């Protein structure tokens, strides 16, 4: 059988939908990497036909097809940064949409046809899919218009302990959780930088513990960090 899929992408931020970064001519990517947002722009609002689908074609296979459509060869390489961000950060979620309502599919191993039949969608009808890009993924703390977050996969030149910040969806950056210094090149206002440094100093214990427990970055010796030992 042949299936027609219609894909819609939305971005979730500040407890509401905010699709401004998905505009085709926009160069504002918010807290996200360009390599993540640009493919989503291209697939947004597009219709695709997959031919000769078997009856047991699963939702998992459909999700994998979308991933490949988005990021192609990047998903073949386990050491690819985009692969890990897409797969492990949980910033991208996929849903089936029936009667304008979004449905999370808990058992993606089941055939797609199982869910379509339950919702009364015939084989000749278009299947609606929604992709949600969630700017709140990985959030640790939010206050004063500043969101602090970490990814489970922390690759890159500053692999040592750090926290990412998003300031009112206007500018983003990263800061060391050891000494509070800014690591990124983002143009962050002095007053916001001071707030961030103060918050890191206030929350350093929690931030270091979160880093050690939830990321694959370099592990911090807590005894030394908390000044319990002097060597």
Image (cartoon, helix red, strand yellow):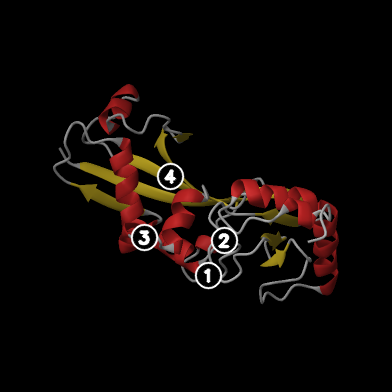
Quarter of the image for residue 201 reads bottom right
Q: CA distance from mark 1 to mark 2?
A: 8 Å
Q: CA distance from mark 3 to mark 4?
A: 17 Å
Sequence order check: which comes first, mark 3 or mark 4?
Answer: 3
The image shows residue 136 at horizontal and vertical percentages of 62, 49
The image shows residue 211 at horizontal and vertical percentages of 66, 52
Would you call the spot at circle 2 few (<14 residues within 10 Å), some (14-19), or many (20 or more)?
few
Q: Is residue 137 left or right of 66 when viewed as pictured?
A: right
Check disc 4 and report its element: helix, strand or loop: strand
Using the image, determine if residue 124 lies above or below residue 187: above
Q: CA distance from mark 1 to mark 3?
A: 20 Å
Can residue 14 be seen here? The reply is no
Q: Is residue 166 left or right of 128 when viewed as pictured?
A: right
Check disc 2 and report its element: helix, strand or loop: helix
Residue displayed at 71% across by 48% down: 209
Question: Which residue is at the front of the view, 162 or 21?
Answer: 162
List the residue tagged with mark 4. Answer: 130
* Total numbered badges shown on the rendered structure: 4
Q: Is residue 196 left or right of 130 when viewed as pictured?
A: right
Sequence order check: which comes first, mark 2 or mark 4?
Answer: 2
List the residue tagged with mark 1. Answer: 26
List the residue tagged with mark 3. Answer: 71
Question: Which residue is at the front of the view, 138 or 181?
Answer: 181
Residue occupying the far front of the picture: 231
List the residue tagged with mark 2. Answer: 20
Residue displayed at 32% across by 39% down: 60
Q: Is residue 23 left or right of 147 when viewed as pictured?
A: left
Using the image, determine if residue 111 lies above or below residue 144: above
Residue displayed at 30% across by 45% down: 5
């Amino acid at each position: 059988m042949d299936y027609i899929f219609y894909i819609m992408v939305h971005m979730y931020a500040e407890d509401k939908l905010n699709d401004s970064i998905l505009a085709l001519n926009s160069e504002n990517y918010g807290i996200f990497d360009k390599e993540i947002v640009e493919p989503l722009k291209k697939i947004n609002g597009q219709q695709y036909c997959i031919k000769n689908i078997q009856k047991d074609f699963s939702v998992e296979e459909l999700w994998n097809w979308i991933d490949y459509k988005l990021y192609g060869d990047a998903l073949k390489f386990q050491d690819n940064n985009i692969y890990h961000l897409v797969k492990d950060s949980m910033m991208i979620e996929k849903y089936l949409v029936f009667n304008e309502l979004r449905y999370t599919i808990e058992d993606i191993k089941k055939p797609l046809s199982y869910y379509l039949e339950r919702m009364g969608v015939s084989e000749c009808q278009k299947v609606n899919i929604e992709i949600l890009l969630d700017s709140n993924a990985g959030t640790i703390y939010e206050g004063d218009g500043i969101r602090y977050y970490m990814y489970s996969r922390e690759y890159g030149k500053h692999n040592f302990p750090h926290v990412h910040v998003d300031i009112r969806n206007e500018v983003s950056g990263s800061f060391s959780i050891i000494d509070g210094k800014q690591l990124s090149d983002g143009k962050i206002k002095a007053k916001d930088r001071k707030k961030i440094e103060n918050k890191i100093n206030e929350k350093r214990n929690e931030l270091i513990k979160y880093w050690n427990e939830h990321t694959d970055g370099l592990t911090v010796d807590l005894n030394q960090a908390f000044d319990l030992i002097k060597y």
